[in-house]
Image (tube, coloured by chain):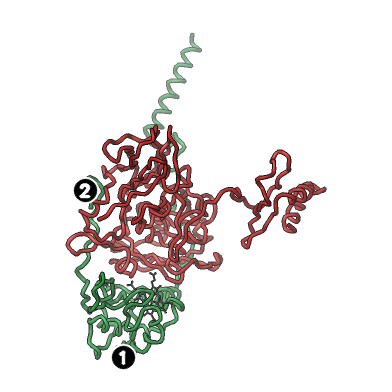
Chain colours: A red, B green
């Protein structure tokens, strides 16, 4: 409360009008300052109050969600999933972007953080965060998905629980190719190692071609500097590539004529394929889609329903999304909400008049390479039954007669 | 009439000039020409060898990056029992943070371990040095990491108990999982892979 009044007195009104308003508002709403300095509304029997009869809160320093909104990530010990079912467009709010880290979120003072680039370069160099921001910048909207983004096994699963390890932001930074030019990459460099400054000192080997193509050293997300959970102050961003390669808290890049075979690209992030073999350096995220409405735990009513969802491909643009409302017997084209961007989530819609019958609804995406999102059965046929990383199966929702929606469990 | 003629000539000349500009390339349009990007921005500073050595901790399969040192299985076992056993279990089997050693007697679904899933022995050194023990990352000396690497390779049946590990011998060790992996060959298109 104290804090709020103090802020308002710095405003243009010498007679603190907001102080007055603030005082009145407290009758119904307590203003609470959270540990991280956020001012939020906390209701005192809020629903009894007619908002036209009560002056509301004055302007604050930072926005907040309505106290009626309970949109949160779902954390486990190692990751935190985006509530895909709560999203309306293509952008993931930064504070709801999924998290996956291997030794927690480090606290990094940007004035002390530097990026070293060395190895097969003409000039080994060090760039401060401020240095990196001086280079020509790029911005692009693209998804970021963890390759371990797959869950099943029971009917009571929401989109968040099934595949909440994907999110989308506008990323801003300097192209890695700009930095490559600055240090002068030697012609025999074929890979580079990206290393993070967290307690895992995360490392991944990346083919140099990706560095020249579209890699970004990102320092901003959705118009503001990166969130700590997303690599503040800098991260590698590799459009369309598995989440783990997008090394956060980036501190070092080493150019090499071979891969390093780090723990995260051998023991982890490799997946079974047939005949007892395992796939290594699986970078591209295959095309995927999921219906986010209606989905568990929502309940629907008879009549017109706009089926909504997300579709994306790590290999380029989404070409079409098809929706089935008869358990996959027939398919219909969904509407894609523009813009349809390269390596980006696209929001899709399909109008359906539900008559109250039991059925299943599904979506499947086709990308610009002609790749059609497979069924779980097809994935198991191609790779064996072990599951693992890079699972992108068609997701089906069962619609029950009473309007309940349940995830359709498929066994292998 | 004359005036009109002059104007025609003027307009014609202008057109010729404009079209010649167009043929000349981009100069008639507001475009970013490539030559406006300098070969160097002169931003950043040259890294000294000392600065590089401080951070350059990655070990490659060919042994590049390995520091000098020797690893002994018996020493490694002692360190493991004090610093690792709480999370990785007795002998590296069955701990809360996962097994590091292949359990040959187990009938359960096989856990992926150094013995059955790691293609290069150098990765064991690299990973332990950078990230373990989980509750105190970066606290081990190079010598301790060598000993632990020797112990874990022995526990997985890859070297015998008297074999010493050095920067020369570690990269030469043939791991059981060496040929387990195939490079990604997915390309999109019609095939499900």
Classify residue A377 as left or right of residue A175: left
Q: Is residue A153 above or below residue B8?
A: below
Q: Quarter holding the N terminus of chain A?
A: bottom right
Q: Residue at x 30, y 73 (%)?
A: B60
Which chain does the numbered disc 1 sit on?
A: B
Q: Nearer the viewer, residue A168 or A33?
A: A33
User: In the rendering, which numbered label is found on residue B191?
Assistant: 2
Mark 1–mark 2 Cα distance, whole angstroms, equals 51 Å
Q: Secondary structure at mark 2?
A: loop
Classify residue B117 as left or right of residue A344: left
Q: Is residue B17 above or below residue A43?
A: above
Q: Is residue A368 above or below residue B147?
A: above
Considering every residue shown, the one lying at the far right of the view is: A15
Within-10-Å neighbours for mark 2: few <14, some 14–19, many 20+: few
Q: Residue at x 22, y 57 (%)?
A: A383
Considering every residue shown, the one lying at the far left of the view is: A275
Q: Quarter holding the C terminus of chain A?
A: bottom left
């Amino acid at each position: 409360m104290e804090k709020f009044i103090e802020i308002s007195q710095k405003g243009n009104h010498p007679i603190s009008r907001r102080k007055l308003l603030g005082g009145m508002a407290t009758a119904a709403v307590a203003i609470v300052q959270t540990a991280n300095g956020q001012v939020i509304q906390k209701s005192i029997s809020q629903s009894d109050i007619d908002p036209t009869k009560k002056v509301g809160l004055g302007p604050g320093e930072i926005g907040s969600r309505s106290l009626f909104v309970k949109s949160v990530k779902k954390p486990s010990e190692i990751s935190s999933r985006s509530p895909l079912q709560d999203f309306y467009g293509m952008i993931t709010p930064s504070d709801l972007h999924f998290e996956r880290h291997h030794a927690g979120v480090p606290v990094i003072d940007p004035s002390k953080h530097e990026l070293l680039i060395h190895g097969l370069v003409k000039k080994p160099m060090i760039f401060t965060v401020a240095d990196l921001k001086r280079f020509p910048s790029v911005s692009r909207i693209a998804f970021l998905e963890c390759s371990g983004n797959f869950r099943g096994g029971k009917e009571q699963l929401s989109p968040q629980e099934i595949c909440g390890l994907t999110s989308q932001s506008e990323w801003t930074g300097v192209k890695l190719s700009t930095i490559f030019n600055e240090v002068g990459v030697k012609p025999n460099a074929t890979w580079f190692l990206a290393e993070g400054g967290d307690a895992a000192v995360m490392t991944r080997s990346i083919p140099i071609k990706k560095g020249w193509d579209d890699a970004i050293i990102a320092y901003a997300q959705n118009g503001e500097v990166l969130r700590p959970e997303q690599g503040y102050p800098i991260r590698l961003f590799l459009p369309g590539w598995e989440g783990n390669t997008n090394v956060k808290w980036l501190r070092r890049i080493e150019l090499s004529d071979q891969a390093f075979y780090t723990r995260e690209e051998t023991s982890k992030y490799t997946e079974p394929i047939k005949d007892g073999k395992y796939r290594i350096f699986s970078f591209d995220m295959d095309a995927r889609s999921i219906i986010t409405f209606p989905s568990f735990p929502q309940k629907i009513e008879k009549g017109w329903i706009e089926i909504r969802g997300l579709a994306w491909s790590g290999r380029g643009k989404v070409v079409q999304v098809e929706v089935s409302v008869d358990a996959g017997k027939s398919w219909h084209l969904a509407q894609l909400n523009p813009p349809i961007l390269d390596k980006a989530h696209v929001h899709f819609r399909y109008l359906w008049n539900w008559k109250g019958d039991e059925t299943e609804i599904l979506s499947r995406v086709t990308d610009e390479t002609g790749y059609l999102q497979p069924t779980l059965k097809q994935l198991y046929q191609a790779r064996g039954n072990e599951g693992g990383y890079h699972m992108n199966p068609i997701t089906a929702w069962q619609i029950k007669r009473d309007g309940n929606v349940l995830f359709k469990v498929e066994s292998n | 009439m004359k005036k009109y003629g002059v104007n025609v000539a003027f307009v014609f000349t202008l057109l010729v000039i404009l079209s010649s500009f167009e043929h000349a390339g981009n100069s008639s349009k507001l475009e970013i020409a490539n030559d406006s990007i300098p070969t160097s921005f002169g931003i950043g500073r040259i890294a000294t060898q000392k600065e590089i050595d401080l951070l350059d901790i990655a070990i490659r399969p060919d042994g590049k990056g390995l520091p000098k040192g020797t690893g002994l299985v018996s020493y490694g076992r002692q360190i493991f029992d004090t610093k690792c056993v709480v999370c990785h279990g007795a002998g590296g089997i069955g701990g809360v943070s996962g097994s590091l050693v292949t359990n040959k007697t187990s009938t359960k679904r096989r856990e992926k371990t150094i013995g059955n899933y790691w293609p290069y022995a150098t990765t064991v050194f690299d990973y332990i040095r950078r990230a373990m023990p989980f509750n105190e990352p970066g606290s081990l000396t190079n010598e301790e990491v060598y000993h632990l690497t020797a112990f874990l390779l022995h526990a997985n049946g890859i070297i015998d108990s008297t074999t010493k590990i050095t920067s020369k011998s570690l990269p030469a060790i043939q791991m059981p999982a060496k040929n387990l992996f195939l490079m990604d060959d997915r390309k999109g298109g019609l095939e499900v892979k």
